[in-house]
Amino acid sequence: MNNLHGIIFAYRENTGLRELTQNRNTCSIPYGGRYRLVDFALSNLVNAGVSDIGLIVQSSYQSLLDHVGSGKDWDLSRKHGGLRILPPFSFSGKYQSGHYRGRMDALAGVYSYLQNIRQDYVILTSGDLAANLPIADIFASHVESGADITAVCSSNSKVDPRMTNYFTVDETGSVTDVSLNPPGPKGEASLETYILSKSLLLSLVDQCAAHDIPSFSHGVLLANRGRLKLRACRFDGYAAKVQSVAGYFQQSMELLDPVVRASLYTPDRPIKTKDQSNPSTYYGPEARSVNSLISDGCVIEGTVINSILSRGVRVEKGAKVENCILMQRTSIQSDAVLRYTITDKNVRVCQGRMLMGHETYPLVIAKNEIV
């Protein structure tokens, strides 16, 4: 697919994620053991044949840069096109806060990049959406329909209604109403993925900049109701957005369901990630692993139940980990007990310690901490 350009918004920092976003933005949070959230957006575009992608970042993006690098693992390291990291250099100092106030602010901050896009169409998507979207089919449907904007939506997405937009859709697929952050679900939930022409995008950015409207929802969806043909494209697969620690824990635990994994990791649209070439995981003679996702490079000598372990995690003899998410190089020493706990990278839980959270309020241990 040579006529579609990808723009990924990777600047969001959700305060509801607490310790998980102290050293990173939301898009680079580990997910499912081997992956980062941004892997889904990158893979969705690459699987559809999109070869030119701009990644808009704002702050706390060192972890994100370390992960995506030059884009080589997604076949995006190229002399012409490929992956471009778009930091906020032209935006710096424009507002006292120094932060993008919304998507239209972000697009205005990279306006010169938008002008040089070679393709006729652009897809705008979020870097913190965990979903395996059939972008090629959605784009073909957009072109065939003649719509000005195609919005990808879902009736079963795992989102908080108060942080989500909803579309009312008629029998022809046209959007008849837009609800912003309602108290409860009201129609089809937006997955914050939109396809439109490059020329229309530039005109909308100009229009919003002239009226100081930073939000895509207000400046595009609401302001142009009835003027632009807005069409909804329903996605019936699994889709989740990470918006809080409790939500992150719940959505991660859902990955232990084979049906959810089958929806996210399909052979015909593989989700790619950074290759770290870790050795195989070692299981000791007394190790026990039940209904868990264990990444490469782990050493398991204790008990792991209903948990997700990233690369390089060590669970020593006598230790018990149940309903937990352990990120890279976490070390659980002998006879320690963890339940409903999330550990960030390089955490060490010392011998005999007991850490217990709750399903609705999991305990979070920040990066590099020793407990």
Image: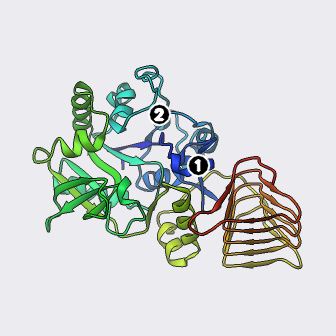
Residue 68 image-quadrant placement: top right
Residue at which label 1 appears: 18
Closer to the eye: label 1 or 2:
1
Residue at x 14% of width, y 50% of height: 229
Residue at x 89% of width, y 67% of height: 334
Residue 158 image-quadrant placement: bottom left
Which amino acid type corresponds to the residue marked 2 in the rendered image? His
Q: Marks 1/2: CA distance?
A: 39 Å
Residue at x 59% of width, y 51% of height: 29
Residue 237 image-quadrant placement: bottom left
- Up-down relation of residue 39 to residue 321 (above or below): above
Can residue 96 be spotted in the picture?
A: yes
Number of numbered discs visible in the structure rendering: 2
Is 68 positioned to the left or the right of 351 in the image? Answer: left
Residue at which label 2 appears: 80
- Up-down relation of residue 97 to residue 22 (above or below): above
